[in-house]
Structure formats: C-alpha cells, structure tokens
Image: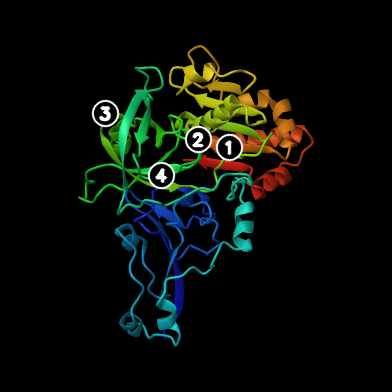
Amino acid sequence: MSEVLEQHLIDPEICIRCNTCEATCPVGAITHDSRNYVVKADVCNHCMACVPPCPTGSIDNWRKVPTSRPYTVEEQLGWDELPAALSDADWAQHGEPADATSAAAQPSSPVASVSSSATTTSAATPSYNATLPPWSAAHAYTNLHGPKAPLKATVVGNVQVNEAGTENETHHIVLDFGVMPFPLLEGQSIGVVPPGVDASGKAHHARQYSIASPRNGERAAYNNASLTVKRVRAEEGHPPGVCSNYLCDLQVGDTVSVIGPFGSSFLMPNHPKSHIIMICTGTGSAPMRAMTEWRRRLRASGKFEGGRLMLFFGARTQQELPYFGPLQKLPKDFIDIHFAFSRTPGQPRRYVQDRMRERSADLAELLKDGQTHIYVCGLKAMEEGVLQALRDIAQGANLDWDAVGSQMQREGRLHLETY
C-alpha cells in the first residue's frame, strides 16, 4: 500500500517566470531552466513562504501522488500544463490506500488559505518583505486575462528615455487597451507574450514588466499604461532578450498580447500624510515613476495632503539613467531626489545605499514614523546593501532594526521587488 504525498507544483501556463518563488524559498526547493520553474519534491518542506509573494498564484498548486513516485524535476521542466489528478486506475497500480481515491479526486493545497504559520515563516526571513499591501491601498484586480486569452493592446508611444548611444538603452512604451477593462495600480505588473516560438518550437512564455504609469493612465483618463523596458543585448554567449528587443522595436500602431494584471501587495498608501521612500536602480524605476506621478497629480488637484517623498535612484552613469530630465523638473518641495552613479569617469563609485547613509538623519526620523512606507525595486544585488544601510541607520538612531523591520513588514509598509 502506497503512502500519499501532497506534492507542491507550479502551473507553467500562468507562471510569468518572475523568479519571486525561487528567491523567496528559504530551503532552495525551487529551480528553473529556460522554460519552467519547478519544485523539488525531496527538498520542499511545505513552509508556504513562497505562496503569498507569487503575483499570479501559479505557485499554489498541489497534487496527491504516491510518496514513492513524485513528479521529478525533469518531468516538471518538460510540462506545458499541470497534469490531471491521478485516476483510480493510477492509484490501483500503486496499491491505493483506503482514502487515496477520494483525496486525490480534487487537487488541493495542504493549507486552505495562507495560515499564521506561513506568515510567521515569511516574517522571519532576513528580507522583511511584506506580503500584505498598506491598509489604505486601493483594491487590486489580478489575473483578468491569462495566456489562453490574452488582451490585445495597441502601441501608442515608444521613446528612448535615457541618452541615445548608451549601452543600457531603455524605452518608455505606452500601450492602449481600447474598450477592454484592464484596471491597473501603481506597483502592479503585466505579462507581455512575445510572438513566435523558442528553440524547441514552443510558444514563448510571458515576460513580466512593472507598470510605469499611475492608475488613471499614462495620459490621464485614458485606458492606457506605460512600461519601462531595457533592451537586453547578446553578450558573453547569452542570446539577446526575446521580449525586451521585441518591445523596444515596436512601432506605433503595432499590437501586443498582454496578460494580467499581477500583484496585490507592492501597492502605495492612499491615506493623507503617508510618507513614501523609494529606492531603485535602472528599470526598477517603473513603479517609482508610477507612484510619483500619481502623487504629483493628486497634489495638482489640491485634494490630497501627501507626506514626504524621497527617491534614491541608482545607475551606472547619468546618461544611462531613465527619466533623468523629467525628474530634474519636479519641484524640490514635492520630492527629495538623490542619484547614485557607479561608473562616472573620474568620480568614486556611489551606490544607493551610500546616498541613503548621507541622509541617515532624515531616514531615521522617517523610520520612527508609523506612516512611512518603503519600496525597493531593481537588481537583486542591491537588496542586501539597502537592507544593511537601513539597519545601520536604525542602529545609529538607537532603534532596533529587527523590531522596526518586522513591524513594517507586518503592517505592509516595507516592500522589496528585486530580480
């Protein structure tokens, strides 16, 4: 008689390959290849830490299988969709236990909803990344359009937003959704499905891009949104980015297949006098631009009393930094901006954490304020340095960073989205 394993699986049809699950898993149970993200059955301990941060819900899938015959990593890497639950005949081959057939009839999760134990596990991780939105965040709609029925959007704008000729060419692309409802919030993302097939002849999977425009559109009161996309060129044996080059080469009038929206936690606060600290590099500026522009529009309307806005923005050089010109035009009494350039000729290397330490007094005061919300977005390599800077700043102000960071996480006030 076979014992039953509740095997944790990832749905390849709706997974957008954002790497959130692999980066979150505390035991290294998740791996991937060029096509799929999969769970190692012999490593996964069902801690559930990966479930809340997943933007699509693709991570929350389970199948009852014989303990002696779980789906292997190799099998999962070859899937285009999840397998059906094992049939009675399948179980009979393995010496079906008394309750296996009824238990296997419906795929289920070992935890019906995210339990307190899962929250505790996530809160104990060093990143302090919140899985809940701020209490005043707007309601986020998610998964309105999937890979089997993507929404067709029309390109209405495509311009380079850093200096021409720079190595990291970055574009601002505006998509119009016509009459189809596609509500988006600052901090959410969408998936773009590039046309064509990969080397194995299978359709390309969607790539995830953060929204760079506020909730009422790139053009206010229009059903459109913008993306910030860096062209990924071929280098050191790696092929060029399939989707980034596709997007950067789009012309006005072209159509694009999109899915989503995704994300329900990396959202901005909406209550008066709430403070926002934004820390980003490169295209991680997309959600920061969206949040800043929404606050700017609210301020212009005279109907919102905002708190402080601080932006720490890193790039290799001023020429490579997206949106440098428009950022320079924002009023100083509206937003406090600090650039960090790591490759300026003749200048010492500066990173966002260096600029944060220079403003330690201001940041320490904000850390003491329960209305402060922190957002970090950019390359994974920046995360450790940013968190260490926050720890140092807190300790310099006689604050217990572990207590402060944990409280901010529980209250949905500290969000990290790195890749």
| Residue designated by label 2 | 287
Q: Residues within 10 Å of mark 2 (few under 14, many from 20)?
A: many
| Residue designated by label 1 | 375
| Residue designated by label 4 | 182
Image coordinates for residue 127, horizontal then vertical, percent: 60, 45
Q: Is residue 382 above or below residue 21?
A: above
Image coordinates for residue 178, horizontal then vertical, percent: 34, 39
Of labels 3 and 1, earlier in sequence is 3
Inspect the image, locate mark 2, and give the three-letter code of the amino acid beneath it. Pro
Q: What secondary structure is found at the residue carrying circle 4?
A: loop
Inspect the image, locate mark 3, and give the three-letter code of the amino acid beneath it. Gln
Quarter location, residue 306: top right
**Of labels 1 and 2, the one closer to you:** 2
> Marks 3 and 1, Cα distance to the nearest angstrom?
32 Å
Judged from this view, the residue extending furthest toward the bottom is 98
Image coordinates for residue 170, horizontal then vertical, percent: 38, 26
| Residue designated by label 3 | 251
Of labels 3 and 4, earlier in sequence is 4
